[in-house]
Image: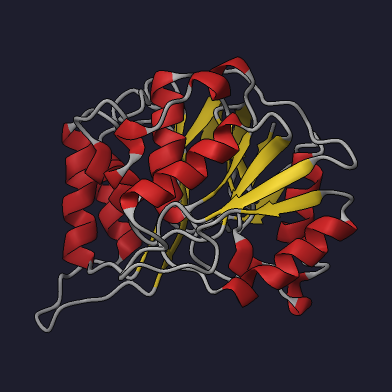
């Protein structure tokens, strides 16, 4: 994997909304904090604009993202929010300038479309990270926000989290890839499906019915994405829902059943995804994951 350059004081960060609508006032705190970190900020035309469900029309969302990918002065792109919409424009984006001069692409949720496409077709690392809504007065000194600050400057931190009863112990080494489960299932069979062989797969999701999570996991399993992993990291699965007739398993049991036949280590409840605490993960970089009876330890 190619690692984009670390940001330097005075570098410019672009904020764009290639998917869902984000009110302009939701970017105020993010711009302030990024400025305090020593960066300048350029707001894209899709920030604060709206077109039905989306931030703008497909053409205008594509144009805004394209401009930031092409602009040599922008050293990182922070997505305003996720939602839905990137898969409508991903095939029309020209990544030529981005290939020649990689920059950090930061975000999660629907931004998994970009992460997966970039990994599958270009081999450039990206950052599964908090977006604009995560920057508030209450999170100024939150560890997961400060981790993002450090990672943008080239310092990748280590994680130690308590053991989860569903964990499968062991040691795993490999590049960490992945993102939102619904998007990974959505991309399977397309040019944007990443190769997970020999890698540590990260998954997370929000607001899904348990039966649908079961279906999506079978989808990526049938696509070969759970075979030959070095390890599996399960992030937050927030606000999962059940039907009137119970599915009969919780989300942890559903996931564990899909990987029961494999022997690689599995880490549950990693603090990343659609939750108040969302630690950044540098996707595409090599990590080491050690899972014991007492803790899970992840280091770059």
Task: Determine the residue positioned at 39% across, 60% down.
Answer: 56
User: Considering only vertical position in the picture, is 3 above or below 73?
Assistant: above
Instruction: Answer left or right for 27 relative to 247.
Output: right
Residue 8: image quadrant is top right
Q: Residue 61, percent across and down?
A: 42, 50
Q: Quadrant of residue 134 in the image? A: bottom right
User: Taking 97 as reference, is 244 left or right?
Assistant: left
Residue extending farthest to the left is: 245
Q: Residue at x 70, y 50 (%)?
A: 160
Residue lying at 56% horizontally and 30% vertically, measured from the top left: 171
Q: Say which quadrant the N terminus sits in.
A: top right
- Residue 33 to residue 123: above or below: below
Q: Position of residue 298 (x, y in %)?
A: 65, 39
In the rendering, at what x and y percent does residue 46 appear?
Answer: 50, 58
Judged left or right of residue 151, residue 10 is: right
Q: Residue at x 64, y 33 (%)?
A: 71
Percent coordinates x, y for residue 120 in the rendering: 39, 23
């Amino acid at each position: 994997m190619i690692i984009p350059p670390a940001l330097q004081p005075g570098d410019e960060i672009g904020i764009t909304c290639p998917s869902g609508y984000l009110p302009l006032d939701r970017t105020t705190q993010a711009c302030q904090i990024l400025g305090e970190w020593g960066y300048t900020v350029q707001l894209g035309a899709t920030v604060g604009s709206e077109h039905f469900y989306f931030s703008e029309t497909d053409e205008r969302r594509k144009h805004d993202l394209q401009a930031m990918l092409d602009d040599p002065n922008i050293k990182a792109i922070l997505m305003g929010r996720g939602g839905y919409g990137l898969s409508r424009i991903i095939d029309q984006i020209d990544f030529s300038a981005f290939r020649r001069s990689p920059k950090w692409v930061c975000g999660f949720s629907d931004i998994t479309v970009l992460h997966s496409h970039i990994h599958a077709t270009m081999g450039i690392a990206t950052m599964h990270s908090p977006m604009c809504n995560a920057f508030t007065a209450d999170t100024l000194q939150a560890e997961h926000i400060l981790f993002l600050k450090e990672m943008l400057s080239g310092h990748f931190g280590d994680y130690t989290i308590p053991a989860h009863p569903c964990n499968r112990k062991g040691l795993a080494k490999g590049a960490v890839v992945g993102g939102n489960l619904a998007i990974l299932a959505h991309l399977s069979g397309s040019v944007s499906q990443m190769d997970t062989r020999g890698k540590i797969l990260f998954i997370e999701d929000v607001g899904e019915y348990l039966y649908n999570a079961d279906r999506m996991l079978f989808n990526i399993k049938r696509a070969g994405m759970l075979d030959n992993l070095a390890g599996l990291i399960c992030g937050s699965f927030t606000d999962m829902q059940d039907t009137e007739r119970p599915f009969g398993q919780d989300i942890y049991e559903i996931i564990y059943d899909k990987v029961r036949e494999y022997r690689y280590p599995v880490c549950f409840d990693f603090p990343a995804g659609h939750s108040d605490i969302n630690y950044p993960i540098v996707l595409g970089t090599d990590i080491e994951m050690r899972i014991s009876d007492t803790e899970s330890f992840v280091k770059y």
